[in-house]
Image (cartoon, rainbow, N blue to C red):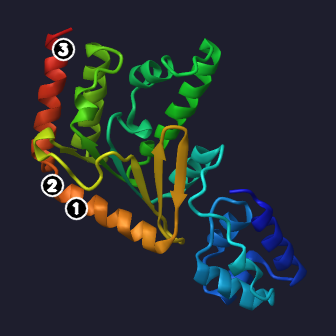
Amino acid sequence: MGNVYGDWLKAQREEAGLTQQQLADAAIMSRSLIGHIETGRRVPTKGDAQRLDGVLNTGNVLSSFLPQEDAAVADYFETARQLEQQAVLIQEFAQCLVPGILQTEGYARAILGTAFPPVSEGECDRRLVTRLERAKILDEAVTPVMWALLDEAVLRRRIGGPDVMAEQIDHLVSLAESGRIQVYVLPFALGFHPLLGNMLTLMWFEDQPPAVYSEGLYVGKVHDAPSVVQELQHRYALALANALPLAETLALLRATARDYELHD
């Protein structure tokens, strides 16, 4: 979203002589959420905006002129990337590709190297560094907690060839065996499931409401409207209930990696 809304909120807060914490306390919100709204990273709910209007004596301006929460923006992923760095729990669903935060260098390079429109080798390297930097949040021993729910298509689509796929799947197994992530597969035999055709990242935070990021071709959206977030959480839970248990998922991952190694 544009930041006209956030800039105006900040100006009204400062004119009222309030700190972010004072405004947050008066509006029954978290200080970090106020900060994210002011910097354009989050959209307040209708109820939040109404309370802000009440505290700041701005009539109904903040509640009437809420940015479109579902609007796609040019830098759509940057907002999601920033939220990802703040999350204490991340639940990914991937339809076709391993989630970026879990990709090996070889797998990521294979994807970025076939980008359309084509990019230079230097630009490919720059994007690769950015993608690998995201994965560093998994260097922490516990936070964020990470769940990956994968459609079986993720394992069967040969990205970069057999060696790259074997390395990538072994990486998932290693992370799961160490207890750093939980990984589950939705098998082809399941047929339809509630997340089919989508890519989702559900994120929870210590001091702000949860958010969901969804992505398609040239479009990405951060959803934080409670009703939308709750529906997507329910869809994730229903799909997860039909996934292979962790032990069976790991067995499938190991077998698939060995198949790639044998057919190199």
Q: Are marks 1 and 2 in contact (CB under 8 Å)?
A: yes
Residue depicted at 44% across the width and 68% down the height: 228
Total labels drawn? 3
- The residue that label 1 is drawn on is 238
Looking at the rendered structure, the kind of residue marked 1 is Leu
Q: Give the position of the C terminus as an image quadrant.
A: top left
Task: Locate residue 26, reporting x and y percent.
Answer: 69, 89
- The residue that label 3 is drawn on is 261
Looking at the rendered structure, the kind of residue marked 3 is Glu
CA–CA distance in space, label 3 to label 1: 34 Å
Q: Secondary structure at mark 3?
A: helix
Task: Locate residue 33, reporting x and y percent.
Answer: 62, 70
In the picture shown, does residue 72 fall above or below 68? Answer: above
Residue depicted at 19% across the width and 49% down the height: 192
Asked which quadrant contains residue 191, the reply is top left
Q: Secondary structure at mark 2?
A: loop
Q: Which mark is residue 242?
A: 2
- Of circles 2 and 3, which is in front? 2
- Other-residue count near label 3 (Cα within 10 Å), few / some / many at <14 / 14–19 / ≥20: some
- Other-residue count near label 2 (Cα within 10 Å), few / some / many at <14 / 14–19 / ≥20: some
CA–CA distance in space, label 2 to label 3: 29 Å
Looking at the rendered structure, the kind of residue marked 2 is Asn
Q: Are marks 3 and 1 in contact (CB under 8 Å)?
A: no
